[in-house]
Amino acid sequence: MTQTPKGDEAHDLSDRVKDGLDQAKDVAARAGHKASSGIDHNPLAVLVGGVAVGALAGALLPRSAREKDLLRPVGARLGVVAGAAIAAAKEAGRSELEARGLTAEGAKEKTRTFFSEVGKAATSAGTAAVKTAKAEVRQDDVSTPGAMPQGAASATRPAAGGAADDAGGFNAAV
């Protein structure tokens, strides 16, 4: 049996269709396996995706008058219940914070106390630093009689401009 050129074309076309169909089956099988594997490994993501697709479809489809009539009381009731739940949660939270002394006024008082204590600590540290510096200066004066502390000028000697400076009459040599 000899085939004509049209018969060859038909046979080639048939082979290409079969190859395409086989490839489509393989792709579908791989996609199915991949989807199954994805569901097994991450079912929560699939659930969230399904909910998102459902919500999108629901938002795009128009509501019928019957749906509106049936769902209006449910929506109103949900709004009331949600409002009551929120109010109860706020009150419970506020009560719990007050029981622990965590009120707005309590926080202000703790802040005042904190900064007062920081101020006292800074004053104490400053006083200790001044006492230590004075003791060092006195020790230098005692160890070298007649010598002035290094970097300080005499209180009786005027500054370069002819007057004592604002730092207690001492001119610092820089």
Image (tube, rainbow, N blue to C red):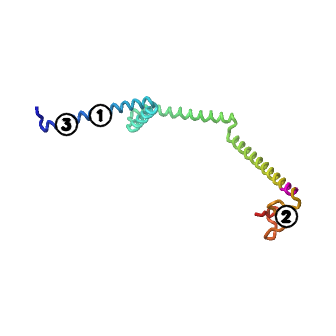
Q: Around disc 3, counting alpha carbons within 10 Å, would you say few (fewer than 14), some (14 to 19), or many (20 or more)?
A: few
Query: What's the amino acid at mark 1?
Result: Ala
Total marks in image: 3
Q: Nearer the viewer, residue 128 or 113?
A: 128
- SS for tag 3? helix
Q: Earlier in the sequence, mark 1 or mark 2?
A: 1
Image position of 88 with respect to 155: above or below: above
Where does label 1 land, which residue? 24
Q: Around disc 1, counting alpha carbons within 10 Å, would you say few (fewer than 14), some (14 to 19), or many (20 or more)?
A: few
Where does label 2 land, which residue? 155
* Image location (x, y in percent) of residue 127: 80, 51
Look at 84% across and 67% down and name the residue there. 157
- SS for tag 2? loop
Q: Which residues are magenta?
A: 137-142
Quadrant containing the N terminus is top left
Query: What's the amino acid at mark 3?
Result: Asp
